[in-house]
Image (cartoon, rainbow, N blue to C red):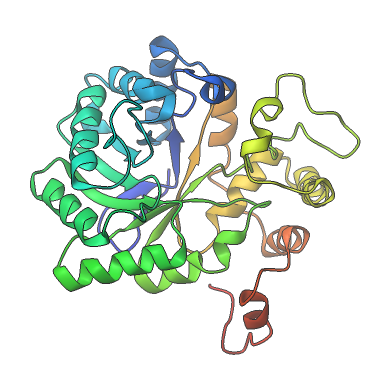
Amino acid sequence: MEYRHLGASGFKVPVLSFGTGTFGGKGELFQAWGETDVAEARKLVDICLDAGVTMFDSADIYSSGASESILGEALKGRRDNAIISTKATFRFDESDPNGVGSSRFHLIKAVDAALKRLQTDYIDLFQLHGFDAKTPVEETLSTLNDLVRAGKIRYTGVSNFSGWHLQKSLDVADRYGYPRYVANQTYYSLIGRDYEWELMPLGIDQGVGAVVWSPLGWGRLTGKIRRGTPLPALSRLHKTADIGPPVPDEYLYRVVDALDAIAEETGKTVPQIALNWLLQRPTVSTVLVGARNEEQLRQNLGAVGWNLTQEQIAKLDAASKVRPVYPYWHQEGFAERNPFPV
Protein backbone atom coordinates (compact mmCIF):
# COMPACT_ATOMS: atom_id res chain seq x y z
CA MET A 1 0.00 0.00 0.00
CA GLU A 2 1.34 3.41 -0.96
CA TYR A 3 1.50 6.07 1.76
CA ARG A 4 1.41 9.83 1.18
CA HIS A 5 1.90 12.85 3.38
CA LEU A 6 -1.32 14.34 4.70
CA GLY A 7 -1.11 17.80 3.19
CA ALA A 8 1.99 19.70 4.28
CA SER A 9 2.26 17.74 7.53
CA GLY A 10 4.91 15.16 8.30
CA PHE A 11 2.20 12.54 8.86
CA LYS A 12 1.67 9.81 6.27
CA VAL A 13 -1.61 8.07 5.47
CA PRO A 14 -2.44 5.19 3.11
CA VAL A 15 -3.77 6.22 -0.31
CA LEU A 16 -6.90 4.19 0.43
CA SER A 17 -8.69 4.58 3.75
CA PHE A 18 -11.82 2.88 5.01
CA GLY A 19 -14.99 4.88 5.62
CA THR A 20 -17.19 3.46 8.36
CA GLY A 21 -20.48 5.10 7.39
CA THR A 22 -21.82 1.58 6.82
CA PHE A 23 -21.25 0.65 10.47
CA GLY A 24 -24.41 0.65 12.59
CA GLY A 25 -27.28 1.32 10.21
CA LYS A 26 -29.27 3.54 12.56
CA GLY A 27 -31.76 5.86 10.88
CA GLU A 28 -33.09 5.76 7.32
CA LEU A 29 -30.04 7.34 5.68
CA PHE A 30 -27.42 5.17 7.36
CA GLN A 31 -29.56 2.05 7.09
CA ALA A 32 -29.49 2.61 3.32
CA TRP A 33 -25.67 2.83 3.49
CA GLY A 34 -25.27 -0.40 5.44
CA GLU A 35 -25.91 -2.19 8.72
CA THR A 36 -22.50 -3.64 9.56
CA ASP A 37 -22.34 -5.02 13.09
CA VAL A 38 -19.28 -5.57 15.29
CA ALA A 39 -18.54 -9.09 14.04
CA GLU A 40 -18.63 -8.08 10.37
CA ALA A 41 -16.70 -4.89 11.15
CA ARG A 42 -13.88 -6.94 12.66
CA LYS A 43 -13.64 -8.99 9.45
CA LEU A 44 -13.50 -5.85 7.30
CA VAL A 45 -10.90 -4.27 9.59
CA ASP A 46 -8.83 -7.48 9.37
CA ILE A 47 -8.84 -7.28 5.57
CA CYS A 48 -7.94 -3.60 5.64
CA LEU A 49 -5.02 -3.99 8.02
CA ASP A 50 -3.68 -6.97 6.08
CA ALA A 51 -3.75 -4.83 2.91
CA GLY A 52 -2.08 -1.84 4.57
CA VAL A 53 -5.30 0.19 4.76
CA THR A 54 -4.65 1.48 8.25
CA MET A 55 -6.80 4.63 8.34
CA PHE A 56 -10.45 4.42 9.39
CA ASP A 57 -12.80 7.38 9.11
CA SER A 58 -15.98 7.98 11.08
CA ALA A 59 -18.12 10.81 12.50
CA ASP A 60 -20.25 11.31 15.57
CA ILE A 61 -23.47 11.60 13.53
CA TYR A 62 -22.92 8.33 11.66
CA SER A 63 -25.71 6.15 13.07
CA SER A 64 -25.92 8.43 16.12
CA GLY A 65 -22.50 7.42 17.39
CA ALA A 66 -22.86 3.70 16.62
CA SER A 67 -20.29 3.87 13.83
CA GLU A 68 -17.61 5.13 16.21
CA SER A 69 -18.62 2.58 18.86
CA ILE A 70 -18.43 -0.34 16.43
CA LEU A 71 -15.10 0.89 15.08
CA GLY A 72 -13.76 1.10 18.63
CA GLU A 73 -14.80 -2.50 19.29
CA ALA A 74 -13.37 -3.71 15.98
CA LEU A 75 -10.00 -2.09 16.75
CA LYS A 76 -9.80 -3.32 20.32
CA GLY A 77 -6.35 -4.72 21.02
CA ARG A 78 -4.81 -3.22 17.89
CA ARG A 79 -5.41 0.50 18.25
CA ASP A 80 -1.70 1.20 17.78
CA ASN A 81 -1.85 -0.36 14.29
CA ALA A 82 -4.56 2.02 13.10
CA ILE A 83 -5.09 5.66 12.23
CA ILE A 84 -8.44 6.97 13.44
CA SER A 85 -10.15 9.88 11.75
CA THR A 86 -13.46 11.27 12.91
CA LYS A 87 -15.58 14.40 12.66
CA ALA A 88 -18.03 16.59 14.57
CA THR A 89 -19.97 19.85 14.08
CA PHE A 90 -23.45 18.80 12.95
CA ARG A 91 -26.23 18.48 15.51
CA PHE A 92 -25.76 15.41 17.67
CA ASP A 93 -28.05 16.07 20.63
CA GLU A 94 -31.52 17.37 19.76
CA SER A 95 -32.26 18.19 23.41
CA ASP A 96 -29.18 20.40 23.93
CA PRO A 97 -29.21 23.95 22.51
CA ASN A 98 -25.40 23.73 22.42
CA GLY A 99 -25.31 20.26 20.88
CA VAL A 100 -24.25 21.56 17.49
CA GLY A 101 -21.55 23.66 15.83
CA SER A 102 -17.89 24.42 16.41
CA SER A 103 -18.12 26.31 19.69
CA ARG A 104 -15.68 25.60 22.49
CA PHE A 105 -18.52 23.99 24.47
CA HIS A 106 -19.60 21.62 21.73
CA LEU A 107 -16.18 20.64 20.39
CA ILE A 108 -14.79 19.69 23.79
CA LYS A 109 -17.91 17.69 24.58
CA ALA A 110 -17.90 16.06 21.14
CA VAL A 111 -14.23 15.04 21.29
CA ASP A 112 -14.54 13.59 24.80
CA ALA A 113 -17.62 11.59 23.76
CA ALA A 114 -15.90 10.33 20.59
CA LEU A 115 -12.87 9.19 22.60
CA LYS A 116 -15.15 7.10 24.83
CA ARG A 117 -17.02 5.55 21.92
CA LEU A 118 -13.78 4.81 20.06
CA GLN A 119 -12.15 3.43 23.24
CA THR A 120 -8.99 5.42 22.69
CA ASP A 121 -6.97 8.20 24.32
CA TYR A 122 -6.40 10.17 21.15
CA ILE A 123 -7.78 10.84 17.67
CA ASP A 124 -5.18 10.95 14.91
CA LEU A 125 -7.17 13.27 12.63
CA PHE A 126 -10.11 15.32 13.88
CA GLN A 127 -12.11 17.26 11.31
CA LEU A 128 -14.87 19.82 11.49
CA HIS A 129 -17.74 18.23 9.58
CA GLY A 130 -18.95 21.58 8.25
CA PHE A 131 -18.42 25.32 8.65
CA ASP A 132 -20.11 27.06 11.59
CA ALA A 133 -20.79 30.66 10.59
CA LYS A 134 -22.20 31.46 14.05
CA THR A 135 -19.00 30.72 15.97
CA PRO A 136 -15.93 32.95 15.63
CA VAL A 137 -13.13 31.18 13.80
CA GLU A 138 -10.78 32.28 16.59
CA GLU A 139 -12.90 30.42 19.18
CA THR A 140 -12.92 27.23 17.11
CA LEU A 141 -9.20 27.24 16.40
CA SER A 142 -8.18 28.11 19.95
CA THR A 143 -10.28 25.16 21.14
CA LEU A 144 -8.67 22.79 18.67
CA ASN A 145 -5.28 24.13 19.78
CA ASP A 146 -6.14 23.26 23.39
CA LEU A 147 -7.26 19.77 22.36
CA VAL A 148 -4.03 19.19 20.45
CA ARG A 149 -1.95 20.39 23.42
CA ALA A 150 -3.96 18.11 25.70
CA GLY A 151 -3.01 15.15 23.51
CA LYS A 152 -6.61 14.33 22.62
CA ILE A 153 -6.19 15.02 18.91
CA ARG A 154 -3.03 15.06 16.79
CA TYR A 155 -3.94 16.64 13.46
CA THR A 156 -6.86 18.80 12.41
CA GLY A 157 -8.84 19.17 9.23
CA VAL A 158 -12.15 20.28 7.80
CA SER A 159 -14.91 18.95 5.60
CA ASN A 160 -17.44 20.64 3.34
CA PHE A 161 -15.83 24.09 3.65
CA SER A 162 -15.85 26.62 0.84
CA GLY A 163 -12.57 28.13 -0.29
CA TRP A 164 -12.97 31.30 1.75
CA HIS A 165 -14.01 29.34 4.85
CA LEU A 166 -10.81 27.33 4.65
CA GLN A 167 -8.51 30.23 3.77
CA LYS A 168 -9.88 32.43 6.54
CA SER A 169 -9.30 29.61 9.02
CA LEU A 170 -5.72 29.13 7.84
CA ASP A 171 -5.05 32.86 8.10
CA VAL A 172 -6.36 32.96 11.68
CA ALA A 173 -4.25 29.91 12.56
CA ASP A 174 -1.16 31.64 11.20
CA ARG A 175 -1.96 34.87 13.02
CA TYR A 176 -2.20 33.22 16.44
CA GLY A 177 0.12 30.26 16.00
CA TYR A 178 -2.64 27.65 16.15
CA PRO A 179 -2.32 24.28 14.38
CA ARG A 180 -3.11 24.61 10.68
CA TYR A 181 -5.65 22.39 8.99
CA VAL A 182 -3.76 19.79 6.95
CA ALA A 183 -6.75 17.86 5.59
CA ASN A 184 -9.87 18.73 3.65
CA GLN A 185 -12.36 15.87 3.57
CA THR A 186 -14.10 16.72 0.33
CA TYR A 187 -16.56 15.36 -2.18
CA TYR A 188 -14.66 14.57 -5.40
CA SER A 189 -15.32 12.06 -8.16
CA LEU A 190 -15.39 11.65 -11.92
CA ILE A 191 -18.96 12.96 -11.85
CA GLY A 192 -18.32 15.63 -9.21
CA ARG A 193 -15.29 17.73 -10.11
CA ASP A 194 -16.25 21.03 -8.45
CA TYR A 195 -13.37 20.49 -6.01
CA GLU A 196 -10.95 21.33 -8.82
CA TRP A 197 -12.24 24.88 -9.33
CA GLU A 198 -11.02 26.50 -6.10
CA LEU A 199 -10.33 24.01 -3.32
CA MET A 200 -7.66 22.11 -5.27
CA PRO A 201 -5.57 25.20 -6.12
CA LEU A 202 -6.00 26.33 -2.49
CA GLY A 203 -4.84 22.91 -1.29
CA ILE A 204 -1.71 23.12 -3.39
CA ASP A 205 -0.94 26.68 -2.32
CA GLN A 206 -1.63 26.12 1.39
CA GLY A 207 -0.56 22.51 1.85
CA VAL A 208 -3.97 21.00 2.57
CA GLY A 209 -4.41 17.39 1.46
CA ALA A 210 -7.67 16.03 0.10
CA VAL A 211 -9.36 13.20 1.97
CA VAL A 212 -11.89 12.20 -0.67
CA TRP A 213 -15.38 11.11 0.33
CA SER A 214 -17.91 9.41 -1.96
CA PRO A 215 -15.30 8.74 -4.68
CA LEU A 216 -17.86 6.71 -6.64
CA GLY A 217 -20.26 9.62 -6.97
CA TRP A 218 -22.81 8.67 -4.32
CA GLY A 219 -22.87 5.07 -5.57
CA ARG A 220 -23.36 5.93 -9.25
CA LEU A 221 -19.97 4.62 -10.43
CA THR A 222 -20.25 1.08 -9.09
CA GLY A 223 -20.61 -0.34 -12.60
CA LYS A 224 -24.26 -1.21 -12.03
CA ILE A 225 -25.76 1.91 -13.62
CA ARG A 226 -25.64 2.20 -17.38
CA ARG A 227 -27.50 3.79 -20.24
CA GLY A 228 -30.89 2.15 -20.77
CA THR A 229 -30.61 0.06 -17.62
CA PRO A 230 -32.96 0.55 -14.65
CA LEU A 231 -31.57 1.31 -11.21
CA PRO A 232 -30.66 -1.97 -9.42
CA ALA A 233 -33.30 -3.06 -6.94
CA LEU A 234 -30.86 -2.95 -4.01
CA SER A 235 -29.25 0.40 -4.86
CA ARG A 236 -29.10 2.87 -1.99
CA LEU A 237 -29.93 5.58 -4.53
CA HIS A 238 -33.59 4.63 -4.19
CA LYS A 239 -33.50 6.23 -0.74
CA THR A 240 -30.61 8.69 -0.88
CA ALA A 241 -30.52 10.15 -4.41
CA ASP A 242 -32.49 13.24 -3.39
CA ILE A 243 -30.01 14.26 -0.69
CA GLY A 244 -26.85 13.46 -2.64
CA PRO A 245 -25.14 15.57 -5.30
CA PRO A 246 -27.34 15.86 -8.42
CA VAL A 247 -25.98 14.33 -11.63
CA PRO A 248 -27.74 14.72 -15.01
CA ASP A 249 -28.43 11.31 -16.58
CA GLU A 250 -26.74 12.02 -19.90
CA TYR A 251 -23.61 13.30 -18.17
CA LEU A 252 -23.47 10.18 -16.00
CA TYR A 253 -23.90 7.88 -19.00
CA ARG A 254 -21.17 9.69 -20.93
CA VAL A 255 -18.71 9.12 -18.08
CA VAL A 256 -19.80 5.50 -17.59
CA ASP A 257 -19.35 4.85 -21.33
CA ALA A 258 -15.75 6.06 -21.04
CA LEU A 259 -15.20 3.93 -17.93
CA ASP A 260 -16.60 0.86 -19.69
CA ALA A 261 -14.26 1.39 -22.63
CA ILE A 262 -11.24 1.62 -20.35
CA ALA A 263 -12.43 -1.37 -18.32
CA GLU A 264 -12.34 -3.40 -21.52
CA GLU A 265 -8.81 -2.18 -22.26
CA THR A 266 -7.41 -2.81 -18.77
CA GLY A 267 -9.42 -5.72 -17.41
CA LYS A 268 -10.19 -3.61 -14.34
CA THR A 269 -13.64 -2.88 -12.95
CA VAL A 270 -15.46 0.43 -13.28
CA PRO A 271 -15.02 1.29 -9.55
CA GLN A 272 -11.31 0.43 -9.68
CA ILE A 273 -10.79 2.75 -12.64
CA ALA A 274 -12.78 5.58 -11.02
CA LEU A 275 -10.72 5.25 -7.83
CA ASN A 276 -7.42 5.03 -9.69
CA TRP A 277 -8.25 8.23 -11.60
CA LEU A 278 -8.67 10.03 -8.27
CA LEU A 279 -5.38 8.70 -6.93
CA GLN A 280 -3.58 10.47 -9.77
CA ARG A 281 -5.15 13.89 -9.13
CA PRO A 282 -3.22 16.75 -7.50
CA THR A 283 -3.56 17.22 -3.69
CA VAL A 284 -5.22 13.83 -3.09
CA SER A 285 -3.71 12.30 0.05
CA THR A 286 -6.19 9.47 0.54
CA VAL A 287 -9.47 8.22 -0.88
CA LEU A 288 -12.13 6.86 1.46
CA VAL A 289 -13.65 3.60 0.30
CA GLY A 290 -16.66 2.02 1.96
CA ALA A 291 -17.99 -1.51 1.75
CA ARG A 292 -20.97 -3.39 3.08
CA ASN A 293 -19.20 -6.72 2.71
CA GLU A 294 -15.89 -8.44 2.02
CA GLU A 295 -16.50 -8.71 -1.72
CA GLN A 296 -16.98 -4.96 -2.15
CA LEU A 297 -13.95 -4.19 -0.01
CA ARG A 298 -11.62 -6.53 -1.89
CA GLN A 299 -12.79 -5.07 -5.21
CA ASN A 300 -12.01 -1.55 -4.00
CA LEU A 301 -8.55 -2.64 -2.85
CA GLY A 302 -7.85 -3.55 -6.48
CA ALA A 303 -7.68 0.16 -7.32
CA VAL A 304 -4.02 0.34 -6.22
CA GLY A 305 -0.83 -1.24 -7.52
CA TRP A 306 -1.31 -0.04 -11.09
CA ASN A 307 -1.93 3.23 -12.95
CA LEU A 308 -4.08 4.41 -15.79
CA THR A 309 -2.14 5.65 -18.80
CA GLN A 310 -2.04 9.33 -19.63
CA GLU A 311 -4.23 8.62 -22.66
CA GLN A 312 -6.83 6.86 -20.49
CA ILE A 313 -6.79 9.72 -17.98
CA ALA A 314 -7.29 12.20 -20.82
CA LYS A 315 -10.27 10.19 -22.06
CA LEU A 316 -11.87 10.25 -18.60
CA ASP A 317 -11.08 13.95 -18.19
CA ALA A 318 -12.80 14.75 -21.47
CA ALA A 319 -15.88 12.64 -20.70
CA SER A 320 -16.34 14.18 -17.24
CA LYS A 321 -15.55 17.80 -18.08
CA VAL A 322 -18.25 20.39 -17.37
CA ARG A 323 -18.28 24.15 -17.77
CA PRO A 324 -17.42 25.64 -14.37
CA VAL A 325 -19.27 28.53 -12.77
CA TYR A 326 -17.94 32.10 -12.86
CA PRO A 327 -15.17 33.19 -12.35
CA TYR A 328 -13.61 29.81 -13.06
CA TRP A 329 -14.79 29.56 -16.67
CA HIS A 330 -13.30 33.01 -17.22
CA GLN A 331 -9.99 31.94 -15.69
CA GLU A 332 -9.89 28.89 -17.96
CA GLY A 333 -9.72 31.31 -20.86
CA PHE A 334 -6.49 32.68 -19.42
CA ALA A 335 -4.84 29.30 -19.01
CA GLU A 336 -1.40 30.74 -19.71
CA ARG A 337 -1.47 32.32 -16.24
CA ASN A 338 -4.09 30.04 -14.61
CA PRO A 339 -3.03 26.51 -15.62
CA PHE A 340 -4.72 23.40 -14.23
CA PRO A 341 -2.84 22.16 -11.15
CA VAL A 342 -0.17 19.55 -11.78
Q: Is residue 81 above or below residue 233?
A: below
Residue 214: tell me if it is visible: yes
Residue 292: tell me if it is visible: no
Q: Nearer the viewer, residue 257 or 100?
A: 100
Q: Is residue 11 above or below residue 236?
A: below
- In percent of width and height, residue 197 lies at 57, 68
Q: Nearer the viewer, residue 116 or 271?
A: 116
Please identify the residue farthest to the right as the structure is shown.
228
| Residue pictured at 21% horizontal, 32% vertical | 80
Q: Nearer the viewer, residue 192 or 286?
A: 192
- In percent of width and height, residue 96 lies at 28, 30
- Locate residue 222: give its quadrant: top right
| Residue pictured at 85% horizontal, 28% vertical | 230
Q: Nearer the viewer, residue 94 or 152?
A: 94
| Residue pictured at 22% horizontal, 66% vertical | 173
| Residue pictured at 77% horizontal, 51% vertical | 255
Quadrant of the image for the N terminus? Answer: top left
- In percent of width and height, residue 30 lies at 52, 24
Q: Give left or right: position of 31 versus 221.
A: left
